[in-house]
Amino acid sequence: MCVIIMSSQQLKKILDDLKIVIGSKIVVKTKDTIYEGILMPRSELSDQNTIVMKLDNGYNVGILYTKDVSIQASKTKAIVRTLGKQKQVNQKFDPKKPKISLVSTGGTISARVDYKTGGVYFLMDPEEILSGVPELKDIINLDSIKSPFKVGSEDMSPKDYIVLAKTIAKELNSGADGVIVTHGTDTLHYTSAALSFMLRDLSKPVALVGAQKSSDRSSFDGAINLICAARYVASDMAGVAVVMHGSLNDDYCLVTPGTKVRKMHTSRRDAFRPINALPIAKIWHDGKCEIIDKAYKKKSDSKVTLDAKFEDKVAIVHTYPGAKTDILDFYVANRYKGIVIGATALGHVPSSWLSSLKKMIDAGISVVIASQTLYGSTHPHVYRQLIELDNIGVIFVKDMLPEVAYIKLGWVLAHVTKSDDVKKMMLENYAGEFTTCLTLNMFLY
């Protein structure tokens, strides 16, 4: 069977004759199927004889233009919730509503597709975020928009945490009732932990929010996340929290403490889950709110104390079967100040590591043990090996997540260096990083 492929010039003429442009909703009929969706620009690297459409489910499809394919304009208008390229012009906010600052750092929530490569890029101005979420003006008075840097969260560093903490503290101490931080999702939980330690005596809400789908897709989840984040910062709750989808549907978000949250899926909308804790609340985009933690911290007008310090010579190492001690030798040779071991279960490491860990501790390197199981708590007094680790000075950090332990250790080592002082600070509950009573309903919430 011979398939006759039409030329790109013929395709262009058909579209011009029908007055169909990029963004128009079209119907494409092939020999076997009918597609309806939005005409999208093609990548420069793609076949120029291909029609690219965005379907209602948010996914794109490419259709090779042959003599058996027909194109026509759809009778229904294209309705896509997307963040437009226009600036936020004449957007009016009610000054009687809570005065909120927005801090944009980058990430998928502030990204769009690069049609030259088919990937996403993070070059959107922060004002553009608001053009697709007009509901914000009915919830908050957006008084200030800051963008101290623009990076994907995979490129975040401790220096960025310090800049971000300073920016937020300045906004809060200048009269903002709360702050929304837009951020990439990959390492959002590291940043939420860093802010939890660096913003001391925090009596106002700071919501970190991201998106799993980019803003040009009809399946964009960032709009609902932003609306729920606005509901949180306009409430009487306080503290650093991650506000993201609580289910696969566009219905409610979970408000989870910044030190008890983790990204648990690569792409699901409800990827961010509380670990060894319950969420503070469920918030629906229409304003309904279910408080889960009845002892939540309440908002007040007191000033936040900025404590933005970080020792960047810290690292995380996960144990695994057959792991050699030369991994540890690297950190000794490079004069690291602290290391977090992602150990198995209650805190086990390979037996061959004990002597190397003792040498590290004797050399003044702080060694912290968290569990790579994530759920549950380490315990230094159940097995003989754990007792031996405890005796040589390893610090078991109970139910603290490895990522949170890494952030906290960097923060602690920027304050103290003596082993006893480091241990004392690592075991003090500064920002809810420890759960005093683990309950059954916290598992896989």
Image (tube, rainbow, N blue to C red):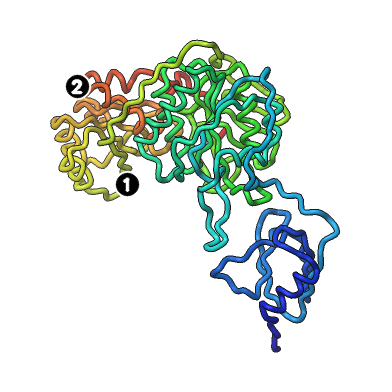
Q: Is residue 314 visible?
A: yes
Residue 142 falls left or right of residue 315: right
Q: Amino acid at mark 1?
A: Tyr
Q: Quadrant of residue 30?
A: bottom right
Residue 10 falls left or right of residue 317: right
Q: Of residues 21 and 6, which is closer to you in this image?
A: 21
Mark 1 neighbour class, 10 Å CA radius: few under 14, some 14 to 19, many 20 or more: few
Q: Which residue is located at x 58 percent, y 66 percent?
A: 43
Q: Position of residue 288 (x, y in %)?
A: 71, 25
Q: Position of residue 214 (x, y in %)?
A: 59, 49
Q: Which residue is mark 2?
A: 418
Q: Which residue is located at x 39 percent, y 24 percent?
A: 198
Q: Of residues 402 and 228, which is closer to you in this image?
A: 228
Q: Position of residue 163 (x, y in %)?
A: 39, 31
Q: Which mark is residue 347?
A: none
The numbered mark, 2 or 1, whose residue comes first in the sequence reads 1
